[in-house]
């Protein structure tokens, strides 16, 4: 899975042959876009050097890469020949010397320059850059735009997906909560949801955090579990959203876990970080920075795990589907592609649950480590009082 | 890594943070709290119900044991009563028997005594009558003997003979 991902990155890099740091006019910018990893109508216009097969592969790579990215409009599918995109525009909110709000239709999927209050904006590689009336994009030698970037608070595809999923969660679980008013046993869809809640409580929260303290963290754990799971599952639908495979989202989730862990931590936990008990003083000094770093690596592992798993899943599934388009023999490729995609999709269904489970599990584990009473210390106090006295001297 | 950092969108992060915060707040208030409370209330209810069923079962067992004990006691009492009654009966029979024997022996004794006295009386009566009869016979005989002279002389002689001999 990782190999596919690495291959994707390298092929994307190969697809951008322009290396000079030059000022390019709108027409050249279009040309750049043509080779850029975005699925557009003009792809391959200028690139006569590529064979049709290579061109196809580049297009597939570009499409997959584009799918993994967030986007300023919700496109379900595009008609390549007519250059038409079927979907809907989303609001763009920019913070650039004042709040600028406009529809993403003004950007025309990166094909036009949007003029708002005398400022010009252009979409380049899925990001909004400030530009002039002609839509000039300055590029450095790594093919990165050097234009100023306004702070982008747009309601992007991922933000919209998050809002929709949040609304779904609210609807599902408030109706479950209401169903308890009628009787002690939920009816309908609640029967499916309730065992999951009990599963989170009995298999994740209580074993990791402890019977006494788990209740405080159940709200966060349940919310995060169902949010990640539902987003993972929606990511497998042809809607083409990829929220949990976006680094910003996983960073945010991990930061939440980190903050909750640090703020609910007790004296024991901080004691173990800054002044490890039971080791000589020089070791205490050496251990402190390691332990502090350790608190950061935990949420980092959390965010990378979720991001990498979901991204890899999306890449593999889309690559397998793309076999149909890249291969020469449709009759032979179709069943292979179809079968493999079906197989991987089933695995991804499991992964969707598993990643949500692991994220919640790890979060509760970290919280549990921060809030638990260290039993071995108590044991020491009870058992060997003289020993602890000696160690203080 | 550079690509990752490049992909990081602060706007999305910002919205995600706000959405997550609001979602957690709303979910806790409107969903998780009532749901968790209902579930734990239900579980407590079930636990209580099981516990009370257990106590009821135990009480039933106790009651049953009590009943059995009472029954056993009653049965034992009945058995002792029966036994006592039997003993009393046997004792009564034995008493009656011995009493009857004693009484019978006494009666027989009396009857024997009566019979003895009756016999003696009858014997005495008989003796009297026999002596009277023999005197009358002797009188008649003597009268017959003494009616002629010879026979009277013969008798006196014989009597004298007998006296001489003595």
Image (spheres, coloured by chain):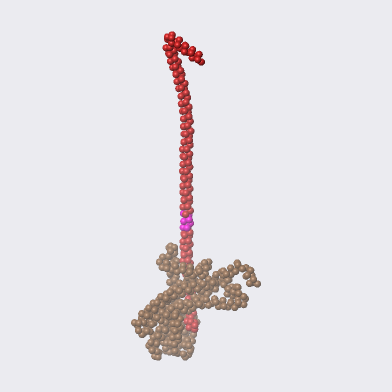
Chain colours: A brown, B red
Q: Is residue B58 magenta?
A: yes
Relative to residue A6, is residue B94 depicted above or below? Answer: above
Tell me, yes or no, whether the highlighted magenta stretch contains residue A312: no
**What percent of the width, then of the height, locates residue A249?**
47, 77
Residue at left offset 48%, top offset 74%:
A359
Q: Is residue A115 visible?
A: no
Of the pair A306 and B77, the residue shown nearer to us:
B77
Against A170, residue A57 (above or below) is: below
Residue A308 picture location, percent across and down: 46, 79
Q: Examine the rendered structure and indicate whether residue A129 appears above or below residue B35.
A: below
Image location of residue A138, percent across then percent down: 47, 88
| Magenta-highlighted residues | B53-60
Left/right of residue B120 with respect to residue A279 in the rendered view: left
Q: Main secondary structure of the magenta part?
A: helix
The structure residue drawn at horizontal position 47% and vertical position 40%, both measured from the top left corner, is: B90
Inspect this view and state whether residue A385 appears: yes
């Amino acid at each position: 899975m990782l190999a596919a991902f690495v291959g994707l990155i390298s092929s994307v890099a190969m697809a951008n042959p322009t290396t000079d740091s030059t000022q390019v006019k709108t027409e050249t910018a279009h040309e750049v876009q043509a080779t850029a990893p975005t699925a557009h109508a003009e792809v391959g216009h200028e690139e006569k050097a590529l064979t049709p097969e290579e061109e196809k592969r580049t297009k597939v790579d570009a499409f997959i890469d584009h799918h993994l990215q967030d986007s300023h409009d919700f496109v379900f599918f595009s008609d390549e020949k007519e250059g038409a995109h079927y979907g809907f525009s989303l609001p763009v909110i920019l913070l650039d010397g004042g709040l600028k709000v406009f529809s993403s239709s003004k950007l025309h999927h990166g094909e036009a320059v949007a003029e708002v209050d005398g400022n010009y904006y252009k979409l380049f590689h899925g990001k909004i850059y400030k530009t002039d009336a002609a839509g000039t994009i300055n590029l450095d030698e790594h093919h990165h735009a050097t234009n100023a970037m306004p702070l982008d608070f747009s309601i992007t595809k991922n933000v919209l997906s998050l809002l929709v999923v949040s609304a779904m969660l609210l609807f599902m679980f408030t109706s479950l909560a209401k169903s308890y008013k009628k009787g002690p046993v939920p009816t309908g869809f609640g029967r499916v949801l309730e065992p999951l809640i009990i599963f989170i409580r009995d298999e994740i929260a209580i074993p990791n955090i402890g019977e006494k303290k788990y209740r405080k963290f159940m709200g966060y754990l349940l919310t995060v579990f169902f949010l990640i799971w539902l987003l993972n599952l929606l990511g497998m639908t042809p809607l083409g959203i990829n929220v949990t495979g976006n680094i910003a989202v996983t960073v945010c989730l991990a930061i939440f876990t980190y903050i909750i862990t640090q703020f609910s931590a007790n004296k024991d936990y901080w004691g173990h970080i800054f002044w490890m008990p039971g080791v000589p003083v020089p070791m205490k000094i050496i251990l402190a920075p390691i332990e502090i770093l350790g608190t950061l690596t935990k949420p980092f592992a959390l965010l990378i795990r979720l991001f990498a798993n979901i991204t890899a899943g999306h890449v593999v599934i889309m690559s397998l589907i793309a076999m149909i388009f890249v291969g020469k023999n449709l009759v032979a490729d179709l069943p292979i592609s179809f079968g493999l995609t079906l197989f991987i999709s089933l695995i991804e269904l499991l992964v969707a649950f598993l990643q949500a489970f692991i994220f919640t599990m790890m979060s509760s584990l970290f919280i549990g480590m921060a809030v638990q009473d260290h039993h071995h210390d108590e044991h020491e106090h009870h058992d060997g009082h003289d020993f602890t006295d000696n160690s203080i001297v | 890594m550079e690509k990752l950092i490049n992909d990081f969108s602060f706007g999305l992060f910002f919205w995600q943070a706000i959405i997550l915060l609001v979602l957690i707040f709303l979910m806790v208030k409107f969903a998780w709290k009532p749901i968790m409370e209902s579930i734990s209330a239900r579980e407590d209810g079930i636990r209580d119900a099981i516990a009370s069923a257990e106590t009821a079962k135990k009480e039933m067992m106790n009651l049953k044991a009590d009943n059995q004990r009472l029954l056993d006691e009653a049965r034992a009492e009945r058995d002792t009563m029966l036994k006592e009654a039997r003993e009393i009966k046997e004792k009564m029979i034995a008493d009656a028997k011995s009493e009857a024997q004693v009484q019978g022996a006494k009666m027989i004794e009396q009857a024997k005594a009566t019979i003895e006295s009756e016999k003696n009386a009858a014997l005495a009566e008989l003796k009297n009558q026999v002596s009277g009869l023999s005197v009358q016979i002797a009188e008649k005989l003597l009268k017959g003997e003494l009616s002629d002279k010879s026979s009277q002389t013969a008798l006196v002689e014989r009597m004298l003979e007998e006296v001489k001999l003595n």
